[in-house]
Amino acid sequence: MNTSAPHLSVVVPVYRNRQTLAALAARVRSALTPVCSFELVLVDDACPDGSGALIDHLSEGDEAIVALHLPANRGQHGAVLAGLEVAAGSWCVIMDADLQDPPEVLPVLLGRAAAGDVDAVFAGRAGRYESSWRLLTGRAYRRLLSRLLSLPRDGGLFVLLSRDAVQRVLALRGPAPSVVAMIGCAGVRAVSVPVERAPRTSTESTYTEVMRLAAAFRALRWAWSCRRRALPAQSGHNRVQRAYFEDRPKPRMVPVDTPYLRRHVDQLIARVGLEPGARVLDVGCGMGRYTIPLADRGFAVEGLDISPVLLDALRGFDGGRDRIALHVADVADPPEELKRRFDAVIGFFALHHVHDLEACFRGMRQLVKPGGSVAFLEPNPLNPLYYIQMAVMPGMSWEGDGGIIRMRPRRVLGAMRTAGLTPEGVSRFGFLPPFAANTRVGAAAERSLERVRLWQAALPFQLFVARAPNGPG
């Protein structure tokens, strides 16, 4: 008997699938035998059609098939969670028993996982595998779930999970109506690979339209309520942020040279009083939208970000000059070799993406030299345009950008003070969108509009500045 854990566990909830089980087992074996060790966990969800007896028959004398019989029907997602609890593989894949999920793509999902830097690989739903109405409503549901939880838009319940992702999902056990929503709430790094689903042929779906609508509503309501509770740790939050920024390139993060962006840099330099040659750390530097202009102006700038993918893009935009030292790290837990090295720790539109303001400011206090500056340019939560952007722009979501609401001066300056920094206040500027501010007339008009007291409290950009203590504390 082989007692070693398999590389892959295939977890399949079974309910009224007697006609497809034998073919499923054969196709899984054919797909995976040349690739890796595996087990097939068939979860009998109190099937009334004799599927349980067939599961026992298939598992007799076959160590690769694990039979799990539930005493009462738990529904598809409850059966999946029960299967994940007994699965022993380093990776686990969830798939349906009706053969709409083709087992032949399992090596493709494993190959994407082997490329690294992911905890979940969804088999993205593609093709015309059911009626037009079901396709339309299914896509609408997945899009809403994606907006709430930063999941791939085409992701369904055919998904490969790392052992760490499985543990995170099981830690959320409770009255959760959707395993996909649990994956999103667990804060795992997820990607998708498009997979053509097969049309349903031998069996009819047990989900009526009313059942589908009710299940979707429960899942969305649960996702809405749990998304904050599911990310109590900075590491979980960071996973979501990495997925948000790395899932698809965001044009607004690309380094460009425009009057609109130059003004952001000018305002921060003037407010902090930075001199050329000053050693500066750009926190949340991303693809170098502001890091590269700072280097061009003669500052000894370095970049810090949680995403190696974005830092690789920064190197490319810098033209291979390698003049900017880059660090993959969480500012809340700064590397020892960076502590007390910088005249200023700064950031542009990065602070509203962090999870714990106090912890991040404590980390910055360790990074900056005694008497050095901490300065961040952030959106103003009183400006309604940001919320309109989140609602209509494909590259934005509340999960990724909702931290804007926390950028209230009392909240940010209070967090600076709690971390041992001395706040030096907040200043606001800006008025016009980029297409207008980038013109000579628009730039002049913007400076006049900024002086009107009526709307100064809602000007779009806020610059927070604080000073580190002069002593060693």
Image: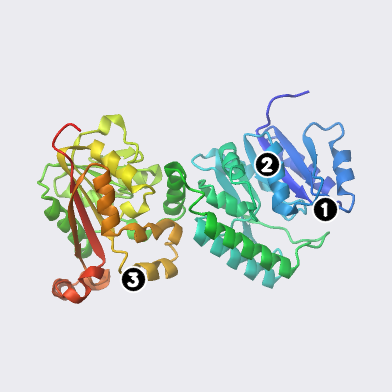
Q: Which residue is denoted by mark 2 in the rendering?
A: 84
Q: Mark 2 or 1 closer to N-term?
A: 1
Q: Check whether the beta carbons of the residues at disc 3 and disc 1 lie within 8 A of each other.
A: no
| Label 1: few (<14), some (14–19) or many (≥20) C-alpha neighbours in 10 Å | many
The C terminus lies in quadrant: top left
Residue 243: give x, y in percent of width and height: 46, 50
Relative depth, front residue between 405 and 253: 405
| Label 2: few (<14), some (14–19) or many (≥20) C-alpha neighbours in 10 Å | many
The amino acid sitting under disc 1 is Asn
SS at mark 2? Answer: helix
The amino acid sitting under disc 2 is Leu
Q: Which residue is denoted by mark 1 in the rendering?
A: 17
Q: CA separation, marks 3 and 1? A: 51 Å
**Colour scheme of the rendered structure:** rainbow
The N terminus lies in quadrant: top right
The amino acid sitting under disc 3 is Leu
Relative depth, front residue between 425 and 201: 425
Q: Which mark is residue 385?
A: 3
Q: CA separation, marks 3 and 2? A: 44 Å
Above or below, 439 against 347 in this view is below
Residue 306 appears left or right of 110: left
Q: Check whether the beta carbons of the residues at disc 3 and disc 2 lie within 8 A of each other.
A: no
| Label 3: few (<14), some (14–19) or many (≥20) C-alpha neighbours in 10 Å | few
